[in-house]
Amino acid sequence: MRFQTPLIPAELKRRYKRFLADAILTDGTEITAHCANPGSMMGLAIPGNRIWLEPNDDPKKKLKFGWRLVEHTGGHFTGVDTSVPNRALKAALQNKEIAEFSAYDGIRPEVKYGTNSRIDFLLTAPDKPDHYVEVKSVTLSRKNGLAEFPDSVTARGAKHLAELSEMKAQGHDATMFYLVQRTDAERVSLAADIDPTYVAAFHAARKAGVEVLAYSCVISPQAITIGARLPFEE
């Protein structure tokens, strides 16, 4: 998934009201950017961080910049836009780049299911059960090489796990897909200290037969694409 407009570097000044961030461009101009991330962004929204912004000239948008990346030491990046995982996975599914899903030709996003919910992707194929796939963006890392989910309490996330369990009980297949938007992650786990309720829902879903996949991302100021599968530590 290539960025529509070339990204430009900036220095983060502050993130506030969840969806706003003030930043300083390389020429000293201070701007306000849209932050497409409702989570806590723990460890990412630190003043002084080098970030990457996507400019736009859309007259319908009040803010002319969108915050897309955080740059870390060693040339590593974290993608902060929570809409990216669904777009990146859709492209990968269409190109059959995810081995576990390569047998499916039908790819339907945002299908209604559960209780007032929409599954991220409903995959279908002849002679196979329908496959419900929920996608989560993983950006938290508190130990070298380890990515964790979630970065804040997520009742919605626990609800999605319960609904995947129900789909499994009805005879369908179900997968929780964690897309790690960090290039410095080597493995993935759950942040039990942040949201024990989510972790309990996760283990209940696993007991019900819900599958778990975690994949890395290849990230640069030009594009974000899905990389290799990562080990998930339950």
Image: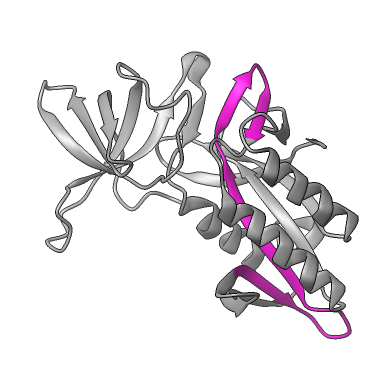
* Image location (x, y in percent) of residue 82: 47, 49
Q: Residue furthest front?
A: 197
Q: Could you tell whether 126 is left or right of 112 in the image?
A: right
Q: Is residue 170 magenta?
A: no
In the rendered structure, which segment of residues is drawn in magenta? Answer: 119-148
Q: Is residue 126 magenta?
A: yes
Task: Using the image, determine if residue 28 lies above or below residue 32.
Answer: above
Q: Position of residue 102 (x, y in %)?
A: 77, 65
Residue shown at 86%/79% (left/top)?
128
Task: Tell me the quarter of the picture where residue 230 sits.
Answer: top right
What is the quadrant of the C terminus in the image? top right
Is 30 left, or right, of 172 in this rendering?
left
Q: Measuring 67% from the left and 74% from the top, which residue is drawn there?
A: 122
**Residue 51 in sight:** yes
Residue at 74% from the left image edge and 65% from the top image edge: 164
Residue 186 versus residue 190: which sits nearer the camera? 190
Q: Is residue 228 left or right of residue 2?
A: right
Q: Main secondary structure of the magenta part?
A: strand
Quarter-wise, where is residue 161 in the image? bottom right
Tell which of 178 and 71 is nearer to you.
178
Query: Relative to the observer, which residue lies in front, 201 or 212?
Result: 201
